[in-house]
Image (cartoon, rainbow, N blue to C red):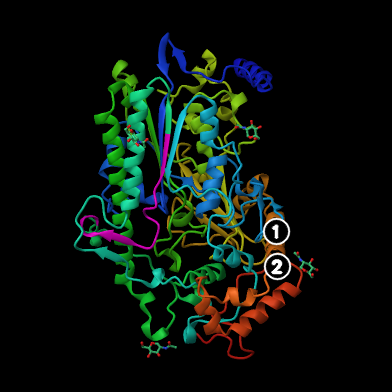
Amino acid sequence: MMKSTILLASAVLLTGSAVVSSRFPLYSRNNDFQPLPNIIFLVCESTDGRTWQRGYQDDVIPLPNLRKLEDDGGISFYRHYSNSPVCCPSRATFWSGKHAHKIRHKQRIKNNDPFVVNGVWNNFEGLDPSYNHTIFDILQLHGYATYLSGKQDYVTGGHSSNVRFDAWTMYTDFPYDIPSNGGWREETDMCLSEGIVHEQDDSIESKYWHGDWESLRETIDWITNHTKKSSDKPFFAYQGMNIVHPQYVTNQRYYSAVDPNKIKVPEWINPQDMHPCDLQASMLKGCFAVNASTNTDADIERRRRIRRIYYAMISEFDAMVGRYVDAVQKDLPKEVADNTVFIVTSDHGDMQMEHHQFYKQAPYDASSSVPLLIYDPRRRRRHQQQPDISLHHQIVSHPTQLIDLFPTIMDLAMVPLYHRPSDLDGHSLLPLIDSDYYSAKQLVKEGHLIGSTAAINTRPNFVVSQYHGDLTAMSWFLIVETFPCVAFDDDSPKVPTTDRECAMKYIVWGTGTEVENMLFDLTHDADELVNLINDPKYAMIRQLLDEHLKSIVEYKAVAEEVATYNHQSFQRWVNVTSNWKDILASKSLRWHISWEEAGNDQAIAAVNQWISEPPQVKACRKHIVWPTPAANSEKWD
Ligand SMILES: *[C@@H]1O[C@H](CO)[C@@H](O)[C@H](O)[C@H]1NC(C)=O
Ligand SMILES: *[C@@H]1O[C@H](CO)[C@@H](O)[C@H](O)[C@H]1NC(C)=O
Ligand SMILES: *[C@@H]1O[C@H](CO)[C@@H](O)[C@H](O)[C@H]1NC(C)=O
Ligand SMILES: *[C@@H]1O[C@H](CO)[C@@H](O)[C@H](O)[C@H]1NC(C)=O
């Protein structure tokens, strides 16, 4: 402890001196000089974190390559969360290591002067193009060669305009009427589709996802080139895959490898029993049938097939990981292979038909949890040298989050504190990993891991995520925290088991008062079907979670700020766009059918009404017809 304090102090002293030699090319442990590790960072799309867990639906998804890495001493994180489950904000959070509500950036409407936005509030928003404190910027500064390929999507302004129009108008009372005309919904028909299986295609590299395979080859090429020409310089190679993002498409090879009988098909409850925000999200995502007489949404076999295709896609991603592992372990010199760490994760999950939804954007685990595997071959080498040190698949079930990757990578690469951004919100994951290899404390003692000391003792037992963008009807905030299980098992007396932890999730909608919030016991209710928010037994836990959530994000203030920002941005846009009504109803946005079906005039009237009122956080609407007729307001039946 004493030692740590001293090291921190010296690191602070060094902060000002940018001229200090930036590189720690070698570190010594027991006089054993070792090079900095290479890092391969693979980020797929839309993967529900639970799908990589052992035993998930009786191991329905073939994941031979990931399993091999696990068996070879890999580390899996089973409660890992996206900090804002939609592409651009999520990627902005992990590349910068900051929470979504802390990513200030400039936004612009058409060619007008840019204005400052305090957070990444929707999928149109991310890091400023000039932002230069990302993980790879810092690694470059530290002497790493870096290469980025495939899907990047973390810079502001990259997405189509509809994502921000949709987010801006979140609190507009657009008219809808589900049974007769499809209601208010986005016009992607993917949620009601049957998915696509290319039956003629039996290749390992499916034709539909060939772009990912091409980026993969290019990246492996770069790694090979780099290793040949400058093997003393460590590398950091990133590929972002598109795979697993809907639409749901696979080929025969992967489809037939998923046993449909193992698939658990999610139950759907009646629309009138749904939480109002689930109902709205489902409608916005086009998951309710447009036409009651072609009501495919209730079809269990369709749901099963969609999940089967989704799992087949995840299996193809596993094959991509395998290709990387082979390229490194079989084709590169052994000393490079033995020193190359893999970090494999996803930007967010996918509802995969749970709670009457697909896509992400929801606070449920299907959407907000992501898988994470860290594979470090140096653990194996250490095990070979000292067989008493075990080499096993380690599973970390403490809550962790994507913004933790920044300090984790900094620790792995031994980046001294004075080269790291001072405002990182995450915590290194290394202290959670068994200390056989990552004796972080030992490294600190030896003076090699400057800056990590803070991470060792201050990691809280919880993580936080939030979302404010399109395809949902209110801002939400969530916290996942672990407690000793016995703490809330009070009416069924149990022997206190200090080794068992229960994970609770608390979800706040809007400012916390507009609709019912949610509380789930993730350990006993993994599908998040039983809302415990009003259960007096959990009152204390709820209060504690609320306090902890607020310690990270003042949710009331943030929800109100987003409502104001939406209101102002929309007005700004209207002010400089004379034909804004035509644009909103145009076919280039994906919601023109809704405008026409609901009656464009009524939709414009709703917008005008919303704009004429002060900005306000409004409750998700719970009726299936809107505006509700004075009498007979529920006419679902
Ligand atoms: C980021 O850019 C600024 C302005 O160009 C520059 O002064 C600074 O050194 C850069 N920082 C890093 C980490 O590259
Ligand atoms: C790797 O080197 C080859 C041969 O010099 C070159 O053609 C190729 O473009 C390089 N690939 C990458 C990704 O740098
Ligand atoms: C609903 O589907 C039926 C059968 O396909 C069709 O006859 C009917 O016109 C559709 N109704 C609407 C409102 O689109
Ligand atoms: C839009 O224009 C109106 C009228 O000119 C003006 O009062 C308002 O401040 C403008 N709003 C924004 C957000 O620019």
State the extent of the magenta-drawn residues as a range.
237-254
Instruction: Estimate how packed mark 1 is, as few (under 14), some (14 to 19) or many (20 or more) residues with alpha carbons within 10 Å.
Output: few
* Residue 579 at x, y percent in the picture: 64, 75
In the image, which disc is placed on residue 444? Answer: none
Would you say the residues marked 2 and 1 are in contact, meaning their CB atoms lie under 8 Å apart?
yes
Q: Is residue 433 visible?
A: yes
Vertical order, 350 against 105 (above or below): below
* Residue 305 at x, y percent in the picture: 29, 66
Q: Amino acid at mark 2?
A: Val
For the point 38% across and 63% down, the residue is 247
Quarter of the image that includes the N terminus: top right
Residue 297 included in the magenta stretch of the image = no
Of residues 89 and 228, which is closer to you in this image?
A: 228
For the point 28% across and 34% down, the residue is 327
The single residue placed furthest to the top in the displayed view is: 31
Of residues 607 and 517, which is closer to you in this image?
A: 607
Vertical order, 98 against 195 (above or below): above
The single residue placed furthest to the bottom in the displayed view is: 631
Residue located beneath label 1 in the image? 112
* Residue 139 at x, y percent in the picture: 51, 30
Q: Amino acid at mark 1?
A: Asn
* Residue 77 at x, y percent in the picture: 42, 41
Instruction: Estimate how packed mark 2 is, as few (under 14), some (14 to 19) or many (20 or more) residues with alpha carbons within 10 Å.
Output: few
Residue located beneath label 2 in the image? 576
Which quadrant of the figure shows ligand 3?
Answer: bottom left
Indicate the secondary structure of the residue bearing disc 1. Answer: loop
For the point 59% across and 26% down, the residue is 419
Indicate the secondary structure of the residue bearing disc 2. Answer: loop
Q: Quadrant of residue 245?
A: bottom left
Lateral position of residue 353 relative to residue 429, left or right:
left
Q: Is residue 547 visible?
A: no
